[in-house]
Image (cartoon, rainbow, N blue to C red):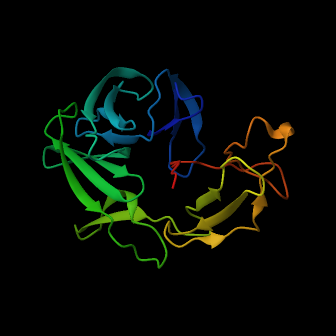
């Protein structure tokens, strides 16, 4: 039996799907009332199933023998403030050691290691701000370990690369009291070099705009309903 664990909205539950083959028909078998956020599944040597999951606070859950319910869950690691955010857990066991690979969005990869699945774990930095293979693309991150037929191990990851990857948006606005103030918008595919997006926008200061202008980021569909936008960081600076 093949088991896959995934989380769904709202972020307070997990659904388990099974199939007799990876390319077969998947069937929802159970719901676990705990969100295994950005999870990685490990099947141990004795067939015990564990799930590593979480954002910044990393936990491990042990599943029942059939993988359809939770036996126990425990926090095993808290990310230091000097590192920031860690997520995207991938769970491995090799030579008696348990490894939880974690990504730092979106420029780093870290690993936790110990001889017990429930920690406490020791953290090591694998890579940080390493140049990727795509010109203008981001840093390889949120990766996994892959072993080839001849026993060699590789780190396989993805990079954010336009037009299908990450885009930075910037708004520069003169919000001092008075008329004739303007806002200008620009975008970037690397977070460094920005290109103007449209013409300058005149900020109205009549009484009808007493509430002032507000920041807003949303998905605007131009051809059909659907789509989404994910905002992972929002920075506000003043001169």
Q: Nearer the viewer, residue 23 or 177?
A: 177
Displayed quadrant of residue 57: top left
Q: Nearer the viewer, residue 115 or 3?
A: 115
Residue at figure coordinates x 25%, y 34% from the top left: 77
In this rendering, the count of numbered labels is 0
Q: Nearer the viewer, residue 42 or 163?
A: 163
Q: x and y percent of residue 146 in the render?
A: 32, 61
Q: x and y percent of residue 14 in the render?
A: 51, 29
Residue at figure coordinates x 57%, y 34% from the top left: 8
Q: Establish if 22 lies above or below 115.
A: below
Q: Is residue 10 left or right of residue 109?
A: right
Point out the image quarter for the N terminus: top left
Residue at figure coordinates x 73%, y 56% from the top left: 181
Q: Nearer the viewer, residue 233 or 171?
A: 171
Residue at figure coordinates x 44%, y 32% from the top left: 36
Q: Is residue 52 left or right of residue 12?
A: left
């Amino acid at each position: 039996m093949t088991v896959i664990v995934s989380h769904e909205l709202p972020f307070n539950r997990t659904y388990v799907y099974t199939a007799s083959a990876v390319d077969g028909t998947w069937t929802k078998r159970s719901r676990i009332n705990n969100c295994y956020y950005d999870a990685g599944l490990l099947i141990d040597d004795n067939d015990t199933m564990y799930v590593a999951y979480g954002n910044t606070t990393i936990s491990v859950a042990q599943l029942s023998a059939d993988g359809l319910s939770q036996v126990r869950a425990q926090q095993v690691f808290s990310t230091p403030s000097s590192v920031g955010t860690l997520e995207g857990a991938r769970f491995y066991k090799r030579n008696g050691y348990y490894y939880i690979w974690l990504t730092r969005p979106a420029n780093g990869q870290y690993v936790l290691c110990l001889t017990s699945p429930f920690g406490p774990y020791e953290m090591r930095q694998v890579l940080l701000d390493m140049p990727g293979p795509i010109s203008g693309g981001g840093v390889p991150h949120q990766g996994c370990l892959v072993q080839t037929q001849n026993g060699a191990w590789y780190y396989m990851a993805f990079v954010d690369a336009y037009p299908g990857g990450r885009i930075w948006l910037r708004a520069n606005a003169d919000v001092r009291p008075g008329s004739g103030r303007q806002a200008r918008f620009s975008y970037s595919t690397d977070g460094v070099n920005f290109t103007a997006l449209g013409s300058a926008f005149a900020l109205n200061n009549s009484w009808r705009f007493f509430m002032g202008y507000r920041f807003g980021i949303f998905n605007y569909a131009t051809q059909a309903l659907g789509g989404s936008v994910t905002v992972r960081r929002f920075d506000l600076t003043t001169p």
